[in-house]
Amino acid sequence: MSGPKVAGDSPTAVEVEAGKAYMWCACGLSKKQPFCDGTHGKTEFRPLFYKAEKTQTLYFCNCKSTKTAPICDGSHKKLRL
């Protein structure tokens, strides 16, 4: 696998809770997008740990092209799917 699989063409809105940890899927293979379910297995990808500083709605990237992982930066708008 040369790059992550595009898991979606738009971000997922998630209400994160202050102090709670989240594991963002970096490979795009998880069935529980945008979060890791361990599917990355023997790939070179590993999930990205994110700890919420405050309770709020955040938009987690599904295209796996964001430069601000795990949060969407709008990169999906430039993809040709």
Image: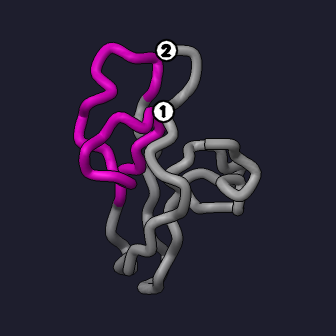
Query: In the rendering, at what x and y percent does residue 22 appear?
Result: 35, 58
Q: What kind of residue is marked 1? A: Lys
- Nearer to us in this view, 28 or 17: 28
Residue at horizontal 49 percent and vertical 14 percent from the top: 1
| Contact check, label 2 and label 1, Cβ < 8 Å | yes
Q: What kind of residue is marked 2? A: Met
Q: Residues within 10 Å of mark 2 (few under 14, many from 20)?
A: few
Q: Which residues are magenta?
A: 22-45
- Vertical arrangement, residue 22 with respect to residue 17, above or below: above
Query: In the rendering, at what x and y percent does residue 57 appear?
Result: 47, 82
Question: Pointer 2: what residue?
Answer: 1
Q: Secondary structure at mark 1?
A: loop
Residue 5, numbered circle: 1
Query: In the rendering, at what x and y percent does residue 47 appear?
Result: 41, 39
Q: Residues within 10 Å of mark 1 (few under 14, many from 20)?
A: some
| Quadrant hosting residue 21 | bottom left
